[in-house]
Image (cartoon, rainbow, N blue to C red):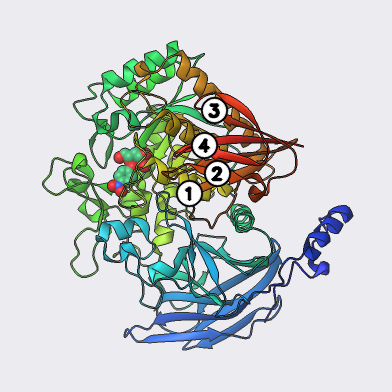
């Protein structure tokens, strides 16, 4: 067994750190940080044989960098440990040296955190896909989750396993990575898969002393003589903040997965949050004209048409009656006005009345027992059929893959769209029988995404949305990291993934560390209008400040006829801050002030050359007073900007925040 006392063991601090930095590092270690070590205690592989009998093979004597292995019924489980990213990386693999094909259920990694079973601890429950919320929870507080009794479509949407095995309840399960924090001063243990090429993964924290990480192998076949590498798992312990640990995970995952992090800062316009499904060609055209005329007030690069143009859900190259022109002509008009043309698709979903579903019923993921296509979405606005469900397409089917490749070649090369918003991507990872039984659900999604990238070409800007977080790393340039915003604050939304500005703000802060580590974060759109919206000026400013503070993509979503010189000034101020923060994010991650908090006041901070910029948000319904020392900002002079009033004030000991408002704090050393 290997102990991860890396922060305390000076000899494992890498040579890359200069002598001066090393001294500084040692000083923080002595600075009353809690001593914590975490270790991998065992790996268990579960599989079934041809007769359906269950077997396990277990590995519990892991040592150093030497490979260890165990064999059972011809199935070999092997693993080795590597020191990297200030932690230990577990590299495990499975080989079938027997005579018969087996089916793999899961690989389970047990990690001893070093915390006492009776300790008070919190864990970070990271969400499955773009819209799923991510939050700190008390360990052991509950075995029940509000989604346990939700509709299948909701669970397939938001969980790597729509039905969790009883030993891994949803309430105690995080996706892809988790952080357990305990003690005072606190220490953190991080466990997270830094790859997502082999399978979906999840981590369960049922008690503070243990994290159970799993590779979900979906009964995939492993033929005689075949081998499968599992995704690498990073384990690390330290006295750093949970947000910094999360950033460390993102750094490692981005590195392992060759993340695309170099796209330029994106500014654009999107049709969705004003027009929704009612968008028409005429409305789009008048906005293109207005955007062209108001270019100096609203300096934008991309004009992106969202949901509502397609002839049917699933048929992305033809339009409905609201769009009498072809998609090619529309892209031409956007480009002639001086913008990049962007378009929305949901490439892994189709409704009953689509050409793709009527002509290719064999391209879908189907129920094991009934052979019926699997439901993965539901929307009355998507179809004229009585059946309002949308079904999951199967990228493991070579016929569908060839279609996807041609489709995206056409949208980019032939039609001229160079910005692609790909939505509802979780559908390709829906459970059910796939054409190719050799690939997991995670691989199926990744294969679909790879096919789209190959068709669209390297130069297209691809934005993932509704997408499981791991599988898209290295393929997409941008990723929606939260639920939809809405022209209403939306604290009354019944589910955290329902469109609602306040839940979007929570996600922007919680996942800020991913920006320029995994891709460009898309915090979702800014709505600038002050009419035809239920957002108040304070709420609009809170949305703008949080989007800007995330350094992420900046798209506005308004009928441009509702905007004026005043809203242009507001936009340019937010854009300037966003771009500045983005430029700093290349070096230092943007971190939540308290990743684990469930309180009304939340925020994030970016290190700058002269100090820091922090965003402070009061998401609650009553006024909040924040004591400045509690924020643990770097020392320096602080000014607060309220975007709603465009007023700056000097801050000393406290900051007062009205309900649903935000302040941008600049700290100058
Ligand atoms: C278009 C929209 C916009 C938006 C996307 C996505 O759970 N739901 O029912 C649900 C519906 C729509 C939705 C998210 C969730 O929004 O995020 O930006 O493109 O689709 O239909």
Q: Can you give x and y, in whole percent of width and height, for residue 307 in the image? A: 30, 35
Q: Which residue is mark 2?
A: 625
Q: Secondary structure at mark 4?
A: strand
Q: Which residue is mark 1?
A: 600
Q: Can you give x and y, in whole percent of width and height, for residue 38 in the image? A: 64, 74
In this rendering, the label closer to the viewer, 1 or 2: 2
Neighbourhood count class around disc 3 (C-alpha, 10 Å): few under 14, some 14–19, many 20 upward: many
Res 186 quadrant in image? bottom right
Q: Is residue 76 left or right of residue 651?
A: left
In this rendering, the label closer to the viewer, 2 or 3: 2
> Does 417 sit above or below residue 611?
above
Image point 40% across, 51% down: which residue? 448
- Front residue of 254 and 609: 609
Q: Secondary structure at mark 2?
A: strand
Q: Which residue is mark 4?
A: 662
Cα–Cα span, label 1 and label 3: 23 Å
Q: Earlier in the sequence, mark 4 or mark 1?
A: 1
């Amino acid at each position: 067994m290997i102990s991860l006392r890396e922060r305390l063991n000076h000899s494992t601090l890498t040579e890359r750190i200069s002598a001066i930095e090393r001294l500084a590092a040692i000083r923080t270690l002595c600075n009353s940080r809690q001593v914590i070590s975490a270790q991998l205690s065992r790996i268990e592989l579960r599989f079934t044989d041809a007769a359906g009998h269950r077997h396990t093979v277990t590995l519990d004597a892991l040592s150093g960098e030497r490979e260890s292995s165990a064999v059972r019924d011809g199935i070999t489980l092997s693993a080795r440990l590597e020191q990297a990213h200030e932690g230990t990386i577990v590299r495990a693999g499975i080989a079938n040296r027997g005579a018969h094909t087996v089916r793999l259920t899961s690989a389970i990694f047990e990690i001893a955190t070093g915390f006492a079973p009776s300790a008070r601890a919190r864990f970070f429950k990271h969400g499955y896909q773009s819209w799923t919320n991510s939050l700190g929870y008390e360990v052991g507080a509950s075995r029940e989750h509000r989604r346990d009794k939700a509709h299948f479509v909701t669970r397939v949407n938001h969980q790597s396993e729509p039905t969790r095995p009883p030993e891994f309840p949803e309430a105690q399960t995080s996706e892809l990575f988790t952080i357990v924090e305990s003690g005072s001063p606190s220490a953190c243990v991080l466990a997270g898969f830094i790859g997502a090429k082999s399978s979906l993964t999840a981590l369960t924290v049922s008690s503070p002393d243990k994290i159970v990480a799993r590779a979900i192998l979906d009964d995939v076949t492993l033929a005689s003589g075949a081998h499968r590498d599992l995704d690498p798992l990073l384990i690390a312990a330290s006295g750093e903040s949970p947000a910094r640990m999360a950033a460390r995970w993102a750094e490692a995952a981005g590195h392992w997965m060759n993340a695309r992090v170099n796209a330029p800062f994106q500014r654009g316009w999107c049709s969705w949050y004003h027009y929704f499904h009612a968008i028409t060609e005429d409305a789009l055209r008048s906005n293109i004209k207005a955007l062209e005329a108001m270019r100096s007030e609203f300096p934008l690069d991309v004009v992106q048409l969202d949901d509502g143009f397609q002839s049917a859900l699933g048929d992305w190259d033809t339009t409905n009656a609201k769009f009498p022109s072809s998609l090619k002509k529309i892209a031409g008009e956007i480009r002639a006005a001086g913008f990049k043309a962007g378009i929305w698709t949901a490439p892994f979903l189709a409704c009953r009345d689509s050409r793709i579903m009527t002509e290719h019923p064999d391209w879908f993921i189907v129920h094991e027992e009934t052979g019926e296509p699997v439901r993965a979405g539901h929307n009355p606005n998507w179809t004229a059929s009585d059946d309002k469900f949308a079904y999951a397409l199967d990228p493991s089917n070579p016929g569908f893959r060839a279609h996807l490749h041609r489709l995206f070649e056409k949208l980019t090369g032939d039609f001229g769209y160079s910005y692609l918003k790909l939505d509802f991507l979780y559908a390709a990872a829906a459970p059910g029988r796939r054409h190719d039984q050799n690939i997991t659900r995670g691989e199926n999604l990744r294969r679909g995404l790879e096919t789209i990238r190959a068709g669209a070409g390297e130069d297209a800007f691809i934005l993932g949305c509704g997408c499981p977080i791991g599988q898209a790393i290295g393929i997409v340039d941008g990723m929606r990291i939260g639920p939809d915003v809405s022209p209403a604050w939306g604290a009354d939304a019944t589910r955290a993934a329902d469109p609602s500005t306040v839940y979007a703000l929570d996600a922007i802060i919680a996942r800020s560390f991913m920006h320029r580590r995994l891709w460009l974060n898309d915090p979702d759109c800014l709505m600038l209008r002050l009419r035809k919206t239920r957002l108040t000026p304070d709420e609009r400013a809170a949305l703008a400040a949080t989007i800007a503070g995330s350094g992420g993509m900046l798209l506005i979503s308004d009928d441009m006829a509702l905007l004026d010189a005043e809203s242009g000034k507001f936009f340019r101020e937010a854009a300037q801050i966003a771009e500045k923060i983005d430029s700093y994010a290349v070096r230092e991650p943007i971190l939540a002030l308290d990743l684990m908090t469930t309180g009304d006041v939340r925020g994030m901070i970016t290190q700058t050359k002269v100090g820091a910029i922090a965003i402070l948000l009061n998401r609650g319904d009553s006024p909040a007073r924040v004591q400045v020392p509690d924020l643990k900002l770097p020392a320096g002079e602080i000014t607060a900007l309220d975007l709603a009033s465009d007023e700056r004030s000097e801050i000393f000991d406290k900051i007062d925040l009205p309900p649903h408002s935000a302040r941008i704090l600049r700290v100058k050393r």
